[in-house]
Image (tube, helix red, strand yellow):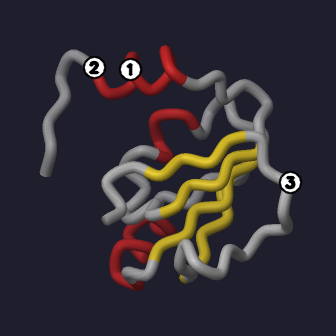
Amino acid sequence: MLSDPENLEYLKLHSLVDFSSKLVLEIGSGDGRLTELYHDVAQSIVGIDLDFDDLQIAQEDALDNVNLLMANAFILPVRINTMDVVLFARAL
């Protein structure tokens, strides 16, 4: 497990992207580690991943504005031009 006691990842992510009231697609959401860094300000999040076990872990911490789906980046489960932010980090 990664440790970030200084919250550098949170600070960097929020310095690059304004998640306030945005519709977010997180490709490769995994266990929800990054999702937890911005879910409180985003309007709605669709998190996709191919790893069922990771999605189950993320679902345990289910957040009202987060919808987790098993899907891949080639066939996105959202309509074109419906998301404000697309986050793709550490998903390769």
Amino acid at circle 1 = Lys
Residue 37 percent across, percent down from the top left? 46, 35
Tell me the residue that label 3 is attached to.
81
Tell me the residue that label 2 is attached to.
8
**Few, some or many C-alpha atoms within 10 Å of disc 2 (few <14, some 14-19, many ≥20)?**
few
Tell me the residue that label 1 is attached to.
12
* Marks 3 & 2, CB-CB < 8 Å contact: no
* Marks 1 & 3, CB-CB < 8 Å contact: no
- The quarter in which the C terminus is drawn is bottom left
Q: Is residue 40 left or right of residue 55?
A: right
* Marks 2 & 1, CB-CB < 8 Å contact: yes
Quarter-of-image position of residue 77: bottom right
Quarter-of-image position of residue 62: bottom right
Total numbered labels placed on residues in the image: 3
Q: Earlier in the sequence, mark 1 or mark 3?
A: 1
Q: Is residue 19 left or right of residue 37?
A: right
Instruction: Give the alpha-carbon distance from disc 1 to disc 3, as whole Å.
Output: 26 Å
Q: Is residue 17 left or right of residue 61?
A: right
Along the line of sight, the residue nearer the viewer: 75 or 12: 75
**Few, some or many C-alpha atoms within 10 Å of disc 1 (few <14, some 14-19, many ≥20)?**
few
Secondary-structure class at tag 1: helix
Task: Name the residue located 68 percent from the left edge and 41 percent from the top edge.
Answer: 85
Task: Name the residue located 75 percent from the left edge and 48 percent from the top edge.
Answer: 44
